[in-house]
Image: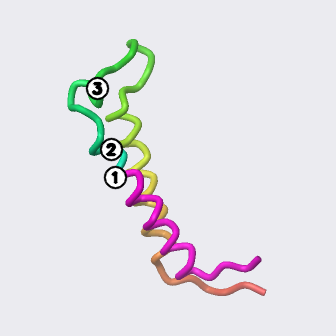
Amino acid sequence: MHMNKDVILAEWQQITDRLSALIITFSPEIFLLQPSPDRWSAAQQAEHLLKVDMTTYQALKSETIPTN
């Protein structure tokens, strides 16, 4: 199946929206809780995912040159 850029961006937006909806269900205490010094809190994980998400989204939105 061939997916065009608009379809990928729309699906990407849906995933980001679902992540945002999930994040707001956490209480601040649980969201910021770091289970141990060597493990990330939910807030740290969400920040990482959203940074990667924004970078990837910007790359997808940029002008591309089709290949054969």
Q: Amino acid at mark 3?
A: Ile
Q: Secondary structure at mark 3?
A: helix
- Element under disc 2: helix
Q: Residue at x 36, y 27 (%)?
A: 41
Q: Secondary structure at mark 1?
A: helix
Residue found 29% across the figure and 41% down from its top: 25
Q: Which residue is mark 1?
A: 20
Residue type, numbered disc 2:
Ile
The tag earlier along the polypeptide, 3 or 2, is 2
Residue at 50% x, 83% y: name it. Answer: 63
Can you name the residue that lies furthest to the top here? Answer: 36
Q: Is residue 55 magenta?
A: no
Q: Mark 3 packing: few (<14 Cα in 10 Å), some, or many (20+)? A: few
Q: Residues within 10 Å of mark 1 (few under 14, many from 20)?
A: few
Label 3 sits on residue = 30
**Main secondary-structure element of the magenta-colored stretch:** helix
Residue placed under numbered mark 2 in the picture: 23
Q: Which residues are magenta?
A: 1-19
